């Protein structure tokens, strides 16, 4: 069952709305004004007006930006494909997990995203699912590597270009160019 916007963490959704509003209003102010306001508000201190333009350079630059990731995630929610970025980020977190906790975390990730009829099932081909299921017998740091790579490629080739054409991104980047 699709959970839509309810599935997006409130903080990320709030941050996406905040970013859109901030880029809309702050980009018209001078650099000095932005700097002084950023010192007053910790959330704004991370704001860089050139940031949206960098997101277009590569998918990796978008994912490495906290602001970009929040906007991209909100975009995926609107496209009903938020499970892709959620799985990707879960895999990133899994790779940093201590070996003693990997088995239980691997099972949770598998049950949530890969198992047949998983609540947030991602779109993987049969072979990738089979290999990942086999990896679950002895989960190690790389047990989700193939599935994660497939989802990354799917997002990079399909979702990312649509994000760059979305009204939200176009509005934010247009305002950044006028600064």
Image: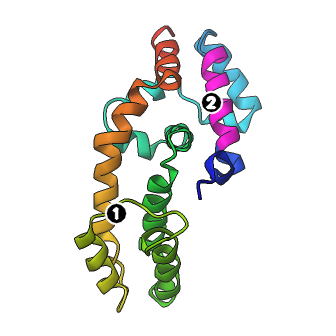
Category of crowding for the residue at label 2, using alpha-carbon neighbours closer than 10 angstroms: few (below 14), some (14–19), many (at least 20) = many
Residue 168: image x %, image y %? 53, 24
Side of 169 where 74 appears, left or right: right
Residue extending farthest to the right is: 40
Residue 56 found in image quarter: top left
Side of 123 where 93 appears, left or right: right
> Measuring 71% from the left and 30% from the top, which residue is drawn there?
39
> Measuring 68% from the left and 28% from the top, which residue is drawn there?
38
Residue 31: image x %, image y %? 59, 15
Examine the structure image and report whether residue 25 is included in the region drawn in magenta: yes
| Contact? badges 2 and 1 (CB < 8 Å) | no
Residue placed most toward the observer, 87 or 60: 87
- The vertical placement of 153 against 17, above or below, is below
Please tell me which of labels 2 and 1 falls first in the chain: 2
Distance Cα–Cα, label 2 vs label 1 = 28 Å
Side of 44 where 72 appears, left or right: left
Instruction: Say which mark, if any, is on residue 19.
Output: 2
- Under tag 2, what secondary structure? helix
- The vertical placement of 89 against 144, above or below, is above
Main secondary-structure element of the magenta-colored stretch:
helix
> Measuring 60% from the left and 21% from the top, which residue is drawn there?
23
| Residue extent of the magenta highlight | 13-26
Residue 174: image x %, image y %? 47, 13
Q: Nearer the viewer, mark 2 or mark 1?
A: 1
Residue placed most toward the observer, 23 or 35: 23
> Measuring 49% from the left and 8% from the top, which residue is drawn there?
178
Instruction: Say which mark, if any, is on residue 83.
Output: none
- The vertical placement of 116 against 88, above or below, is below
The color scheme shown is rainbow
Residue placed most toward the observer, 62 or 112: 112
- Under tag 1, what secondary structure? helix
Instruction: Tell me the residue that label 1 is attached to.
Output: 148
């Amino acid at each position: 069952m699709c959970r839509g916007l309810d599935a997006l963490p409130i903080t990320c959704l709030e941050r996406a709305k905040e970013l859109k509003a901030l880029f809309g209003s702050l980009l018209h102010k001078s650099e000095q004004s932005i700097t002084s306001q950023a010192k007053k508000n910790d959330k704004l201190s991370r704001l860089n007006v050139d940031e949206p333009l960098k997101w277009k350079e590569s998918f990796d630059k978008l994912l490495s930006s906290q602001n970009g990731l929040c906007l991209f995630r909100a975009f995926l929610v609107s496209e009903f494909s938020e499970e892709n970025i959620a799985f990707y980020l879960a895999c990133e977190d899994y790779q940093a997990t201590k070996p003693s906790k990997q088995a239980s975390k691997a099972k949770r990730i598998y049950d949530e995203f890969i198992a047949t009829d998983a609540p947030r099932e991602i779109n993987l081909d049969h072979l990738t699912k089979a290999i990942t299921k086999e990896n679950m017998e002895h989960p190690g740091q790389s047990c989700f590597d193939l599935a994660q790579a497939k989802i990354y490629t799917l997002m990079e080739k399909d979702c990312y270009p649509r994000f760059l054409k979305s009204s939200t991104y176009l509005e934010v980047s247009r305002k950044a160019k006028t600064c």
